[in-house]
Amino acid sequence: MTDILASRSYRGLATESAVDAVHNELDSLWGELPLVQDMDQMTFTTAVIESTSNIVKHAEPAGEDPLEISVDLEVRPSQLRARLSAYHAKPPYGSMEPRTPDQDAESGRGLALIQALVTTVTFERQDATNTWVLSRTSQD
Amino acid sequence: MKFSYETKESYAEVKADGRLNMVSAPELREFVSELISDGSTRIVVNLEQAVFMDSSGLGALIGCLKAARQAGGDLRIAAVQPQVKMVLQLTSMDKVLTPYATAEEAFSND
């Protein structure tokens, strides 16, 4: 079993305020573990915030219950891991494959950016919960 | 995120302070749009204090660039921090939004 050096969790409504709240959790994590390399902090933070924003922007409620988001962050000796879930959500629509938009496009770069920043991205759906797991293996 | 601006001799300098994400991106669009409406079409966005930018923030910068060019001017960025530089490079948008070292340099050759 892999040791977890530090962790943070957030759960709340999937609204814009979740984006800054999750970012604050990430900053708090790096504050506790300053030895995590700057490059790892920077890339992982960017991937987690992109993914959080994707849920807030695109997730749709499956029924009357409001959409909720949870983000669980873990630092392990050689891996950073984030588990992001959208609760009471419809299945994601459209392609989850990254695109390469035109240079003057103002959106559509998020998925490609996430894939460039982390080592693995997995998706699973159970009941009305969509879950993405991001992991980044440390460059040590 | 906080935005402020200062009118210089040949351009307007917008200072962005904080995280340029999906929450603040629409605010940047509105801020720059008002500047352009007021006649400032040569704009430098100084990102020295912008500690973070995601694809929403990048999209807002591209939208502001297009708006400035449509008004006959241009928009340039300066003093980018490592995370912002990384996002520009990974998306290949550093070719469109080329970062200048300082706001003063951005329009110094034209």
Image: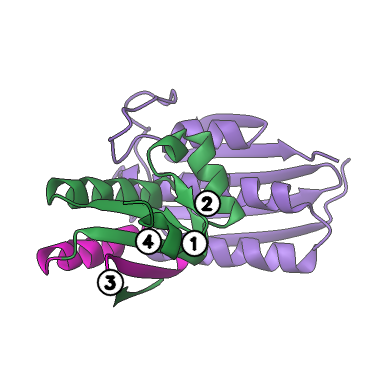
User: Pointer 2 indicates a residue of which chain?
Assistant: B
Total residue callouts: 4
The local secondary structure at tag 1 comes to: loop
Q: Please name the residue shown 79% across and 40% down the image.
A: A138
Q: Mark number for residue B102?
A: 1
Quick check: marks 2 and 1 in contact, CB under 8 Å?
no
Q: Are marks 3 and 1 on the same chain?
A: yes
Find the distance from the CA under tag 4 to the CA under tag 2.
13 Å
- Estimate the x, y position of residue A52 in percent, counting from the top left: 47, 50
Residue with the mark numbered 4:
B45
Residue at the spot 31% in from the left edge and 51% down from the top edge: B110
Query: Does residue A55 appear left or right of residue A113 in this picture?
Result: left
Identify the colour of chain B in the image: green
Q: Is residue A139 visible?
A: yes
Q: Secondary structure at mark 4?
A: strand
For the residues labelled 1 and 4, the Cα–Cα distance comes to: 10 Å
Q: Which amino acid lies under the numbered mark 1 shown in the image of this protein?
A: Thr
Magenta region, residue range: B10-39
What residue would you read off at disc 2? B84
Name the residue beneath numbered marker 3. B9
Q: Earlier in the sequence, mark 3 or mark 1?
A: 3
Task: Give amino acid for label 2.
Answer: Val
Look at the image and give the colour of chain A: purple
* Mark 3, secondary structure of its residue: loop
First along the sequence among labels 1 and 4? 4
- Quote the CA–CA distance across marks 2 and 1: 15 Å
